Image (cartoon, rainbow, N blue to C red):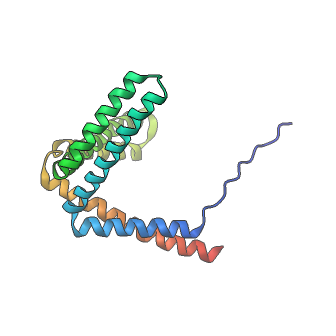
Amino acid sequence: MEKAVVLETKDSPWWLLLMSGITSLIVGVLLISSPILKTTAIAWVIGLFWFVQGIFVLINMFVDHSAWGWKLFSGIISIAAGLFLLENPVIGAVTLTATLILLLGIQGLISGLIELVLAFKGGGWGMGIWGALSAIFGVILIANWTNPSFMLTLIWVLAVFAIIGGIAEIFLAFRKRRTN
């Protein structure tokens, strides 16, 4: 007779959920208060990260000689992208936001079409409706990915989701604290 393997996971502490909720709430409020400024700051931080990462990739190329061509290419691209964002954070913020909208649109369209196919193969009406909505949402995102007002709206929507999610996490953290 085989023994069942039981994997035990340690439950994370309530205060970790609380900290996550507070962080989400702060990010949401900051994005709503000044979305363009905060998005520009995020682009600058990403630029700094890419710049430093590129330097470390190049240093690693001299320590570990395997795949040195890819490391050289990756390091140079990271440094160049990082410098671009550091020198042009506003353009970088717009570019990053537009790219995110385009990628989300493509993902929504593809997953929507897959869900529609699965719905016709017996997945049910719910999957069909969800697939149609995902595909429509994807097309809307793709059609508006360069529209500045749409980008600003997306930032506000993300901010509202961060605020709602943060509040929910804070409530869950206190509920978890009471039950422990």
Write the residue at 27% across / 64% down: 31
The N terminus: image quadrant: top right
Front residue of 120/42: it is 42
The C terminus: image quadrant: bottom right
Write the residue at 36% across / 63% down: 162
Q: Quarter-wise, where is residue 142 in the image? A: top left
178 versus 160 height, above or below: below
The location of residue 169, given as percent across then percent down, is 47, 68
The location of residue 102, given as percent across then percent down, is 24, 42
Q: Is residue 153 left or right of residue 8?
A: left
The location of residue 160, given as percent across then percent down, is 31, 65
Front residue of 113/25: it is 25
Q: Is residue 108 left or right of residue 145?
A: right
Front residue of 7/108: it is 7
Looking at the rendered structure, the number of numbered marks drawn on it comes to 0
44 versus 32 height, above or below: above
The location of residue 19, given as percent across then percent down, is 48, 68
143 versus 68 height, above or below: below
Write the residue at 82% across / 41% down: 3
Write the residue at 27% across / 60% down: 157
Q: Quarter-wise, where is residue 2 in the image? A: top right
Q: Residue furthest right?
A: 1
